[in-house]
Structure formats: C-alpha cells, structure tokens
C-alpha cells in the first residue's frame, strides 16, 4: 500500500481515519411550507390583477412624465398608493394602484414630494379607501 492509499484509509499513522459528519440541508418546517405556498398563491393573484390593470390602461407612466413602458407588464410598474404591507385589504383594489416608470417608482419610495401627482393620488386614495 502506497502513501496515498494509506492516507485514504487512515492507516498512515496507525490510527483509523475519523469519518466526517456530512452536512445536511435542514428540511423546511410545515409552518414555513404553508407560508411559501400562500406567497405563491398571492403572487399568482397579483399577476392576474396587474394584467387586468395593464390591459385597461395606456402603457404610460401616470406620474405626469408620460414615459412609455413597453408592451409587457412588470411588477415594478405597479405602485400601491396605500402600502400593501400596512393595508393588505387594498392589495387588489384598482383605486390603490398607479402605473409608474421604474425610476419614478423608486423616487416615490425615497421622496414622494418630488412627484406631486403621485402624492395627490395617494391623498385621494386615503380619503376614498380609508373613509370610516
């Protein structure tokens, strides 16, 4: 037996080689699986909802710049005037959606005051949807 064979079999120094424990990827918990499935369903519902809005409106930015957005809808085009994380009940409400160019969408989330039309529509949505 040569040096490398002895090394492989752990007999180089007269001691048997220790077997390394294999790392196993943790299984997803049942609770997490349910959450993942719910997110997939919600994502599919979002796609259908966004497609309806896309088909019913001109494919232009609604912030006032009127930039064309192309032929295919992207999720980054759809801005929730009332955040869906805070108001999940308005996630699929047409009055809560505004179609924006991705640059304008990013601008809204950093400083809404630079886009007065979006700010005005947000205030309108608050009055319309939160009237109680």
Image (tube, rainbow, N blue to C red):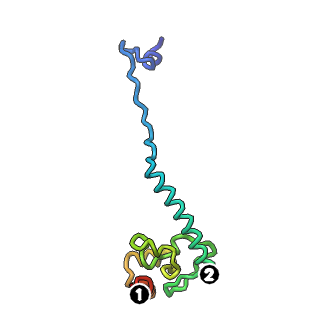
Q: Residue 51 carries which label?
A: none
Return the disc, 1 or 2, that comes first in the chain's sequence: 2
User: For the residues marked 1 and 2, what is the alpha-carbon distance in whole angstroms?
Assistant: 24 Å
In the rendered structure, find residue 56 and report the number of the disc placed on it. Answer: 2
Position of 107 relative to 13 (above/below): below
Can residue 55 be spotted in the picture?
A: yes
In the rendered image, the vertical position of residue 37 relative to residue 122, given as above or below: above
From the viewer's perspective, tell me whether residue 84 is left or right of residue 49.
Answer: left
User: With 48 as the anchor, is 81 left or right in this view?
Assistant: left
Q: Quadrant of the C terminus?
A: bottom left
Image point (48%, 54%), residue name:
34
Q: In this view, does 116 lie to the left or right of 42?
A: left
Q: Give SS at disc 1.
A: helix
Where is residue 114, by image quadrant? bottom left
Q: How many marks?
A: 2
Q: As rendered, which of 71 and 29 lies closer to the eye?
A: 29
On residue 127, the disc is 1
Q: Which of 101 and 126 is in front in this view?
A: 126
User: Marks 1 and 2: which is nearer the front?
Assistant: 1
Tell me the residue at 36%/12% (across/down).
14
| Residue 109: image location, x then y, percent | 40, 75
Measured from the top left, where is residue 68 in percent x and y?
58, 81
Q: Position of residue 90 (x, y in %)?
A: 46, 76
- Tell me the residue at 40%/30% (across/down): 21
């Amino acid at each position: 037996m040569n040096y490398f064979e002895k090394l492989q079999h752990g007999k180089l120094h007269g001691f048997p080689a220790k077997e390394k424990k294999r790392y196993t990827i943790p299984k997803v918990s049942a609770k997490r699986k349910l959450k993942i499935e719910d997110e997939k369903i919600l994502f599919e519902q979002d796609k259908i909802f966004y497609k309806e809005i896309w088909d019913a409106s001109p494919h232009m930015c609604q912030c006032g710049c009127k930039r064309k957005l192309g032929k295919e809808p992207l999720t980054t085009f759809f801005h929730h005037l009332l955040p869906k994380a805070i108001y999940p009940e308005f996630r699929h409400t047409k009055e809560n959606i505004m179609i924006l160019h991705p640059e304008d969408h990013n601008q809204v989330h950093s400083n809404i005051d630079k886009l007065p039309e979006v700010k005005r529509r947000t205030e309108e949505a608050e009055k319309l949807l939160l009237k109680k």
